[in-house]
Image (cartoon, grey):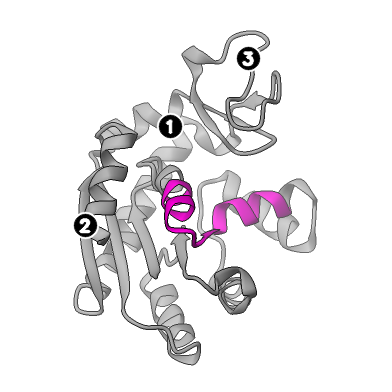
Amino acid sequence: MQIIIFGAPGVGKGTQAKILASKLQIAHISTGDILREAIKNETELGKKAKSIVESGGLVPDEIVAGMIKDVLKSERCKNGFILDGFPRTVNQADILDKIFVELNQGKIDLIKLDADDSIMINRITNRKVCNKCGNISVKSEVTENYTCPSCKSVNSYITRKDDTEEVIKNRLKLYHEQTAPVFEHYKDKANIIIVDGTQAIDDITKSLLEKLK
């Protein structure tokens, strides 16, 4: 099974991708996680990407495309994959089409999670992220000595530098200008699944699994 999960920043793509990957026993490929790890470790890629990510911009295609291809070719993806965070532009979609042809991939499922911008701004500016495993919680839940429900780390939650209102508005602007057209690119190339991204997490998962079947 080959899946691309699509939607505006903060709509819950990462959360659903992790859940679906676990339930379907396929690989979760998150460009965001890969890039953040590179930035944290101050790799050559991380140094190049740091200023771009923190300003809400898009990392150049040449940095991302090769990394995606290598992961899709790996043993990790032998049972299938769910792509989270790529492609974000029509150019990236064209590159991915060529990668799929080269790797002889079949028709893909494209999941689109819908939500209004105002909801996304409120959701992102009111969240904190575990700096150990990436789990997300709302700020009101993260009290002193808060324990991450995923990795059990204590006091590990932070506010990302790219989760401010100014940055998220810029990311949403880029999404509408550069990423939204990707959906049109795949209309005749993929099995399209659209779900309301403002629902409860469990309800979204249930709906997606039913539609994927």
Q: For the N terminus, which image quadrant?
A: bottom left
Q: Report the front residue among 18 and 194.
A: 18
Kindly identify which numbered label has been placed on residue 154: none
The Cα atoms of the two marked residues, 1 and 2, are separated by 27 Å
Q: Amino acid at mark 3?
A: Tyr
Q: Please give the name of the residue rendered at 68% of the width and 11% of the height, measured from the top-left corner.
A: 145
| Upstream in sequence: badge 1 or badge 3 | 1
* Mark 1 nearby-residue class (10 Å; few <14, some 14–19, many ≥20): many
Circle 3 packing at 10 Å, graded few (<14), some (14-19), many (20+), is: some
Of pointers 2 and 3, the one earlier in the residue sequence: 3
Q: What's under tag 2, amino acid-wise?
A: Lys
Residue under label 1, please give it: 124
* Mark 2, residue position: 211
Please tell me which residue is depicted at 71% across the width and 19% down the height of the picture.
Answer: 154
* Quadrant of the rendered image containing residue 169: top left
Task: Locate residue 123, reporting x and y percent.
Answer: 38, 29
